[in-house]
Image: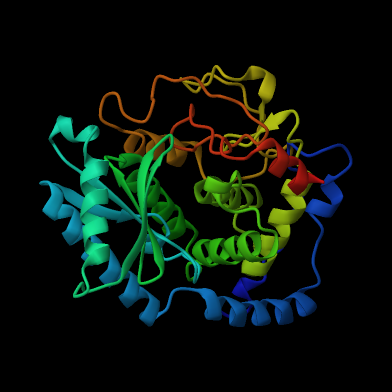
Amino acid sequence: MGEHEGWAQPPSGLSPNGLLPNEAPSVIRVLNSERWSKAEERTAELIACIQPNQHSEELRNAVADYVKRLIAKCFPCQVFTFGSVPLKTYLPDGDIDLTAFSKNPNLKDTWAHQVRDMLENEEKNESASFRVKEVQYIQAEVKIIKCLVENIVVDISFNQLGGLCTLCFLEEVDNLINQNHLFKRSIILIKAWCYYESRILGAHHGLISTYALETLVLYIFHVFNNSFAGPLEVLYRFLEFFSKFDWDNLCVSLWGPVPIRSLPDVTAKCYTAEPPRKDGGELLLSKLFLEACSAVYAVSPAGQDNQGQPFLSKYFNVIDPLRVNNNLGRSVSKGMFYCASA
C-alpha cells in the first residue's frame, strides 16, 4: 500500500459545490494522521482478503474462455470480457460480463435464443468442462443471458460497445491517479461496503449500478484532487460528501453539479453545471482530459446506445462522463433512494 500513501490532506481552501446548506465543514474535515495511519493499515489487510488474487483470476479467466467458446459455436462472432473482471475490481461474489460482436445484423433478434439453447444443452452435458446451471433470458433495457458457471454469475450481452469504452476510460483514470492503483483499491473497498454492509449495490434489484458507483468514486477523486491517505479516507470522503449532497435539486456530473431543472436538455453538453469547487481550486481531471475521453470513448456505431435520446431524470441522477444523455442512476428505485437517504 505504500507508507501512508504520502499523507496528503484536503486541498487548502477546498469548498465543494452541490452540498446542502452548512454541511461543508464535515466534508472537508482534516483527519488525525497518526490515528488514520493505523486505520489505513488495517484497511489494507481487509482489501487484501477481498481483492482479486491469482486463484480467482485463473478461475474467472477459465470460465470466461469456456463461455466464449460456447458462444462462438452459435454464430460467427468475437466475444470480449468487460466490467470488473478485466478492470480487476470485482468482489469475491462478482460476476463476469461478456459481450458478443457480430457483423450479421439479423442476429440482433435471434442471438439470445441461440445462446440460451446452447447453454441449456451444456447444462445437461455431464461431461462438460464446467458446471452450467440456472440459465435465464432477461429481456430488460439491454437483453442479457444470465447463468451460473462454477457458481460464478455470467452475464452475456450483444454488441454492447459501451461497456468496453467504459473499461478503457476507467483504466485511463487509474493510470492518471496512479499511487499503486489507489483508484481501483478504493473502488473495491467502497463496492464491498455498498454490497455487503449497506446493500445498495445491484442495478437489477433497483439499486445503484457499478458504473454509477465508480463515477461517484471518481467524482471524489476529482474534487479532492487525489489528496488521500489511502482507500479508507476515500470511503470516508465518499460517505460524507454524498450523504450531504443536494440530490433533490442537483445531478452529479464530472463537469460539476447540474441543476435538475435544466434537464433533460443535455444531449449536446449544453447543460449549465456549477463548478465542482466554489474556491476555484485545481481539479484532478482537466477539461482537456474529459473532452478527449468523451471524444474517444463515446464513439458508437450508428443507432446504438440511444445517442439521440434525452437525459431522463429520476430519483438519483448521475450523468455518464462519456455520454451526457445517459443517466447512470436510472436503475435506482424510489423506495431504495429514500431508504438510502434516510
Q: Is residue 249 left or right of residue 275?
A: right
For image coordinates 82% across by 58% down, the residue present is 29
How many circles with numbers are drawn on the protein?
A: 0
Q: Is residue 17 left or right of residue 77?
A: right
Q: Could you say which is closer to the camera, residue 308 or residue 218?
A: 308
For image coordinates 52% across by 45% down, the residue present is 285
Residue 85 higher or lower than 201, as above or below? below
Residue 175 higher or lower than 322, as above or below? below
Residue 246 higher or lower than 168, as above or below? above
Q: Is residue 297 left or right of residue 45?
A: left
One can see residue 9 in this view? yes
Q: Could you say which is closer to the camera, residue 259 or residue 276?
A: 259
Percent x, y of residue 201: 59, 54
Percent x, y of residue 58: 31, 77
The quarter of the picture where the N terminus appears is: bottom right
State how the image is colored: rainbow
Percent x, y of residue 319: 55, 34
Q: Could you say which is closer to the camera, residue 139 or residue 121?
A: 121
Percent x, y of residue 262: 64, 18
Q: Which residue is situated farthest in the right direction here? A: 22
Residue 6 higher or lower than 184, as above or below? below
One can see residue 1 in this view? no
Q: Is residue 220 left or right of residue 93?
A: right
